[in-house]
Image (cartoon, rainbow, N blue to C red):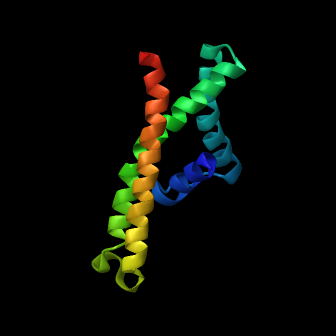
Amino acid sequence: ASTLAGQIVMEGYLNIQIPLWARRLLTRLVTLIPIMIIGFVMGFSEQHFEQVIVYAQVALSIALPFTLFPLVALTDRRDLMGQHVNSPVVRWMGYVLTGIITLLNVQLILSVILPFYW
């Protein structure tokens, strides 16, 4: 997914026109290089990689509410969405589900952080 997102950003937003093979190679290298660096630092241990993945997911879960709440709020604005604005039911379901996701993310963060303090 990150490779495809990188390709879209390069072509659509940054207007970088390079051959398809070079764009794919560049975006895959940008994805692969940090993984290889982490691998060398961690000694390519499967157990350490699993811990890194868990910590990465915890970091992503911290950012999720900061994108979901504004997304629900923006899709509820008639001046932005026009006829595609959320109905009241969809708006409240969006906020309720975003709240549930946020609470689950807080629980995840606490379950990862608290064992270090006990």
**Residue 35 in view in this figure:** yes
Look at 56% across and 52% down and name the residue there. Answer: 5
Quadrant occupied by the C terminus:
top left
As drawn, the residue found furthest toward the left would be 79
Whether 31 is drawn above or below 64: the answer is: above
Residue 45 vertical placement versus 53 (above, below): above
Res. 34 in view: no
Q: Residue at x 62, y 47 (%)?
A: 3
Query: Percent from the top left, x then y, of residue 69?
Result: 36, 58
Which of the pair 31/115 is nearer the observer?
Answer: 115
Residue 103: image location, x then y, percent? 42, 47
Q: Nearer the viewer, residue 20 or 107?
A: 107
Image point (42%, 57%), residue name:
98
List x then y, in percent, for residue 15: 49, 57
Query: Based on the displayed image, in which of its 4 quarters is residue 82 positioned?
Result: bottom left
- Farthest residue to the front: give it: 118
Would residue 106 appear left or right of 73 to someone viewing this image?
right
Residue 73 x %, y %: 32, 66
**Above or below — where is 118 with respect to 110?**
above
| Front residue (pair 81, 26) | 81
